[in-house]
Amino acid sequence: MHSNRRLRWATIPIATMLVVVLAGCTQTQLRGYLPGEPGITSNTDRVTGLWVTSWIVLLIVGIVTWGLIIWAAVVYRRRKGQTGLPAQLRYNMPIEIFYTVVPLLLVLGFFAFTARDQAAIEAPIEDPDVTIEVYGKRWAWDFNYLNEGPGGEGVYSAGVQATELDGPATVDYDQLPVLYLPVDKSVEIKIESRDVIHSFFVVDFLYKKDMIPGKSNYMYFTPLKTGTYIGKCAELCGEYHSLMLFQVKVVEQAEYDAQIASLAAAGQTGTLGEEYNTNSNQPGTEAPEREGNSE
């Protein structure tokens, strides 16, 4: 009776502390310290939810585990005058089942929720409003706006490697390749590589996709907030990997149309395709045979 009363009194300050701590959390803390803010794209809140929920479950498991370890160390410690080993616990079926079932449920739960969210994020958009082809190259980016331009032949923007200003910690952001996207429009991005494996990563979008030579990958999303977002290659691709940067500008439809018109007016019509790939000796490229090769 008295022990239950003491337990209830002990839980009051703990519960109060948890309420105060959670109430004082910033948005960054509530989002698990992920970059960006809520609702940047149609996928970011789903990624954030999976991330934060996973950490909450893992923290609970950690607290319970450490609590049991400390409890066992304190309660079953060797007392003064005791010798030998304490009573050993063997073949306790309820505990054995508990230790087997709980980890299995955790693994299955993580797998199920991850598979659910991955399937939703990777689901193709049947008729996207905008289709863009992105080529990664050492160490910059080419952007093809497919089905755009006056005749629908497409327009392109060719990027160059980031320029360092006063040292490796600063770059000239005004010279970075820029990918324009219209806000509230569904987007399909076809991802290609001209040479080695790169990775297309817009940091605040909380998602990246590998760019593999000879293989097309795709990303599908709808940008929901206007703004400028930094992008980078997330796969070590060579000496100047750290300078393989770009920007994404999510703008209103009128500004997006003006950007497309400016590329067309500059003569950048058509697309920059596979003819600029440096891997000209890949299978299927009809590379010339060496003289004297009889095979």
Image (cartoon, rainbow, N blue to C red):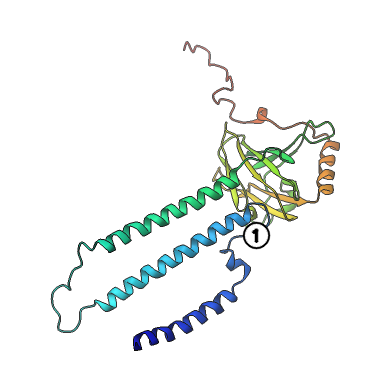
Where is residue 222? Give x, y as percent.
Answer: 69, 48
Which residue: 19% across, 64% down?
90
Residue 277 vertical placement versus 90 (above, below) = above
Q: Which residue is mark 1?
A: 36
Which residue: 61% across, 31% down?
278
Q: Judge by depth and name the residue closer to the eye, 167 or 271.
A: 271
Residue 45 vertical placement versus 273 (above, below) = below
* Left or right of 103, for residue 76: left
Q: Secondary structure at mark 1?
A: loop
Q: Amino acid at mark 1?
A: Gly
Which residue: 28% across, 75% down?
73
Mark 1, Cα crowd under 10 Å, few <14 / some 14-19 / many 20+, is: some
Q: Residue furthest front?
A: 1
* Left or right of 3, for residue 282: right
Where is residue 60? Give x, y as percent.
Answer: 44, 67
Residue 168 visible in the shown view: no
Where is residue 186? Give x, y as percent.
Answer: 71, 45
* Left or right of 88, for residue 16: right
Where is residue 12? Give x, y as percent.
Answer: 47, 84
- Could you tell me how many numbered marks the image carries? 1
